[in-house]
Amino acid sequence: MQETLLAYHSTLVACVVLAGLVTLQLLVADVASIRAKHVPGMPVTDGHASFHFRAVRALGNTNETLGLFLLLAGLAIALAANPKWVGLLAWIYVAARAGDERREGARVSRCQKAAARITASSPSWAAT
């Protein structure tokens, strides 16, 4: 069993790094919730401009795909898929999860500007 897992060392390290990333996202979301005086169990109603909203969504987005990632990684190891490819794909997923929020912040800003332009140029009867 150890020999089999040794070939997937890179994949297993990616899983450990992902666990650390989820822990960090959880801590950041908790601190943001405390600072925003958010009532536990209630939905976050802040908009995209709020750091609290972004921190909670970052954790939620990671959590939504975490189960599928772990299932596929475990299945790939159980089926003895090519360790290099499995490791590479695992690291791509981890890097995408780590870098997604940085890109998301810029994308939200562009979307907010576009929405403001559309709202400003829409006829007054469309607002009713």
Image (tube, rainbow, N blue to C red):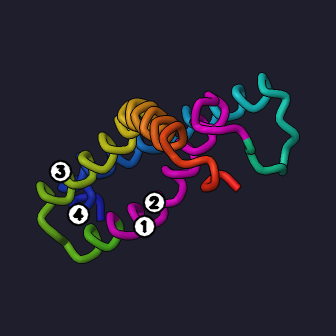
Q: Which residue is mark 2?
A: 65
Circles 3 and 1: CB distance less than 8 Å? no
Residue found at x 40% / y 69%: 71
Bounds of the magenta segment: 46-73
Mark 4 closeness class: few <14, some 14–19, many ≥20 residues within 10 Å: few
Residue closest to the eye, 30 or 124: 124
Residue closest to the far bottom: 79
- Horizontal and vertical percent position of residue 58: 53, 42
Amino acid type at circle 1 is: Leu
- Counting the numbered discs, the total is 4
Mark 1 closeness class: few <14, some 14–19, many ≥20 residues within 10 Å: few
Q: CA distance from mark 3 to mark 4?
A: 17 Å
Q: What SS does tag 2 mark?
A: helix
Residue found at x 30% / y 65%: 1
Examine the structure image and report whether residue 62 is included in the region drawn in magenta: yes
Q: What SS does tag 4 mark?
A: helix
Relative placement, left or right, of 36 versus 92 is right
- Horizontal and vertical percent position of residue 25: 56, 36
Q: Which residue is mark 3?
A: 88
Q: Earlier in the sequence, mark 2 or mark 3?
A: 2
Circles 1 and 2: CB distance less than 8 Å? yes
Q: Which residue is mark 4?
A: 4
Q: Main secondary structure of the magenta part?
A: helix
Q: Nearer the viewer, mark 2 or mark 4?
A: 2
Residue closest to the far top: 35
Image quadrant where residue 28 sits: top right
Quadrant assignment for the C terminus: bottom right
Image quadrant where residue 24 sits: top right
Q: Which residue is mark 1?
A: 68
Circles 4 and 1: CB distance less than 8 Å? no
Relative placement, left or right, of 38 versus 70 is right
